[in-house]
Amino acid sequence: MTTPTLPARRRWTREELLIVLDLYCRIPFGQFDYHNPQVIRVAEAVERTPSAVAMKLGNLASLDPGLKQRGVSGLGNASASDKAIWQEMHADWTAFTSESLTARQNHGLVDKAESTEALESEAVRDRITEREATTTQRVGQNFFRDALLSAYNYKCCIPGLTLEPLLVASHIVPWRDDAKNRLNPRNGLLLSVLHDKAFDRGFLTLDDDLIIRVARGHIPSADEFFVQSVASYDGQAISPPEKFRPHPDFLAYHRENIFLG
């Protein structure tokens, strides 16, 4: 009696890994499940099972130091290819978002609106000014926002606001000051519109332990609304993200160059 030969396991291609890693960045850790419609859609596009995609998300999670810091871990079976694509992403976020977009386009995962938006963004790359950035789609801005929404579970990390139209993917080091890290989610916080503006103008900052510091010398004590909505959070910790914990170097830059305290 002959033993049946099992079919060889199909290796994950580079494009498939780019697509799944892009998905990893855009959905919360708790949604890495084969029942998730987004997981199912990606699985259909790359011709794999939802379970296989969910497992690959878990393998990628094992590489995330932010999850480990919170005592959460992935499946721990990351391959050499997983590790390589993870390192590439962190080395050049702009290249990653561009390549993952192309991979998603090739597999029918990009709708017409996103495709048009990406082409417009490509046309202004490397010559975009801060003024232009306020009126045109910033390169990869949707990716940056999605990554922060998923990392903070769709809640402002200060008061916990969950009304998505009032949430801002805020840069720690401003867009104009660090082209390399414009799309790096570790250079971001998910803030309400009010706290985004206060952070951007230097009225508040974070220390390395993610404790809020308010510029006390600039607090208008007569403004009760400001005291209650901003100054009252002085000394409190933000709600930490599941993924993409703010990098200490970016926080130090904000304290040294933007914070008014």
Image (spheres, rainbow, N blue to C red):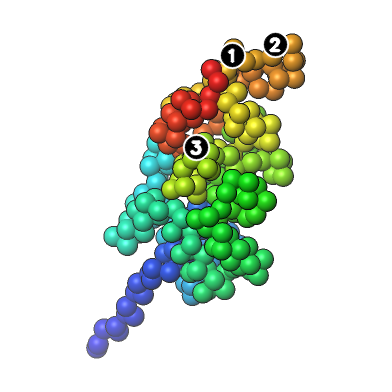
- Residue 221: which numbered mark, if any? 2
Q: Residue at x 46, y 64 (%)?
A: 99
Residue projecting furthest to the bottom: 1
Q: Which residue is mark 1?
A: 216
Q: Earlier in the sequence, mark 1 or mark 3?
A: 3
- Report the amino acid beneath label 3: Val
Closest to the observer: 189 or 239? 189
User: Residue 49, how many percent across, how many down?
Assistant: 49, 70
Packing grade of label 2 (10 A; few <14, some 14-19, many >=20) is few
Q: Residue at x 59, y 32 (%)?
A: 200
Residue 10 position (above or below residue 114): below
Kindly indicate whether the residue at mark 2 contacts the one at mark 1 (C-beta within 8 angstroms). no
User: Residue 152, how many percent across, how many down?
Assistant: 56, 40
Q: Residue at x 52, y 27 (%)?
A: 258
Packing grade of label 3 (10 A; few <14, some 14-19, many >=20) is many
CA gap between label 2 and label 3 equals 28 Å
Q: Residue at x 45, y 31 (%)?
A: 253
Q: For the residue labelled by badge 3, is the local secondary structure a helix, a strand or a loop?
A: loop
User: Residue 178, how many percent across, how many down?
Assistant: 46, 43
Kindly indicate whether the residue at mark 3 contacts the one at mark 1 (C-beta within 8 angstroms). no
Q: For the residue labelled by badge 2, is the local secondary structure a helix, a strand or a loop?
A: loop
Residue 186 position (above or below residue 225): below
Mark yes or no: residue 153 visible. no
Q: Which residue is mark 3?
A: 173
- Report the amino acid beneath label 2: Ser
Closest to the observer: 238 or 112? 112
Residue 121 position (above or below residue 102): above
Q: Earlier in the sequence, mark 1 or mark 2?
A: 1
Closest to the observer: 208 or 38? 208
User: Residue 212, how many percent across, how many down?
Assistant: 54, 23
Mark yes or no: residue 66 visible. yes
